[in-house]
Image (cartoon, rainbow, N blue to C red):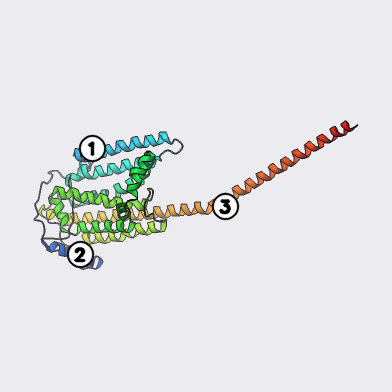
Amino acid sequence: MRVLVHGPWEHGHVSVTRSCRRLAGVPIVVATGLAAAGPVPPTSGPVPPDAPSLGGLVLGWSFEPVVLLPLLAVAIWWWRTLDGIDRGHPEHPVPKRQRWALVFGLVAIAVALQSGLARYDTTLFSLHMVQHLLLTMVAPSLLALAAPITQLLRASSPGTRQRLILPVLHSRVVLVIGHPILAWILFAAVMWGSHFSPLFNASLEDPLAHDLEHLAYLTVGLLFWWPVVGLDPSPHRMAYPARIGYAFLQMPLNSFLAMAILFADASLYPHYATLGAPYGIDALSDQRLAAGIMWIFGDLVFLVSTLMLVGAWMRSETRASTRPSAERRVDAEMASIREREAALRLRRATGAGDQAGPADSTSDR
């Protein structure tokens, strides 16, 4: 399993077009300073002899136990836990979309780290970018949609919740790292910092750095999407307008990052530059393809999530506006029922008096 790290430097110098500097001036200046501090000497490393194909990317799995066994263990635990919840609460079973969301999220992680993508991630930046998008956007959002904290609370005993889970959720650490502002900043900082620092090239040369980069991507992705989805309890729960702005404002940062990579007039990462054109695509063309993937797919994810939040907000407002009228209708129906019951009691009382009258007069005679 490898990890990729990005950095906009080429032999101690970053070369970017003037338009790119205007769009992302500050990050480029910072990246240039990091690059000047001393690049990692590039080495070509092993290049797969066969060019990537759809079949190879889909079927070319590596099956590393250190990655797949934990994912499989989590999937089995999740399924058995939700089965227990369904048996204990048959009137409120776990929604199927939440049951499958976590499974698909684990599959996305496995695809990123164990499929044919991982075989070419140090050879082609474009496939490396697909790997990163799976770890930062696809897998974390699916895991958040599963509401794992909520399901863990439902499956746990009252004692376990009070002694273990709730103290962790209310801890100072969770209060800090769970703050949406910090999560938003960390997501942007990791994306920009990893692509525009020597870390990217270092990860291409060092498997441990590669793995740590992937872990950082998945972690900041989970922190970012947790408040966006908003299904699990959070110490800083945001209203729909704040969640919409939170997701939408990340989109221009993704666009500017993609443009900074796209408009660079030289290869940003020495590792890829030293490989030449192994499959007929040179490092600069492959870099531009990677930037296009980031730009289109990343912006699409943020746009779709924003629109989904708007739709959820509208549905929430509709339910809130119809609830008072529904309550008034129920109150009116209950009042009508009470009036009919009172009239019925009155008729019964009157009827009983009429029947008792003749009997009394007969006894008097």
Say left or right for 107 vs 336: left
The image quadrant that residue 291 belongs to is bottom left
Q: Which of marks 2 and 3 is nearer the N terminus?
A: 2
Q: State the separation of the CA atoms marked 2 and 3.
A: 56 Å
Q: Residue 69 carries which label?
A: 1
The image quadrant that residue 337 belongs to is top right
What's the residue type where badge 2 is placed? Ile
Residue at numbered disc 2: 28
For image coordinates 12% across by 64% down, the residue present is 36
Q: Where is residue 359 in the image (x, y as percent from the top left)?
A: 84, 32
Do labels 3 and 1 touch, CB within 8 Å?
Answer: no
Q: Position of residue 77 (x, y in %)?
A: 31, 36
What's the residue type where badge 1 is placed? Leu
For image coordinates 39% across by 58% down, the residue present is 242
Residue 147 in sight here: no
Do labels 2 and 3 touch, CB within 8 Å?
Answer: no
Say left or right for 166 vs 31: right
Q: Where is residue 107 in the image (x, y as percent from the top left)?
A: 28, 41
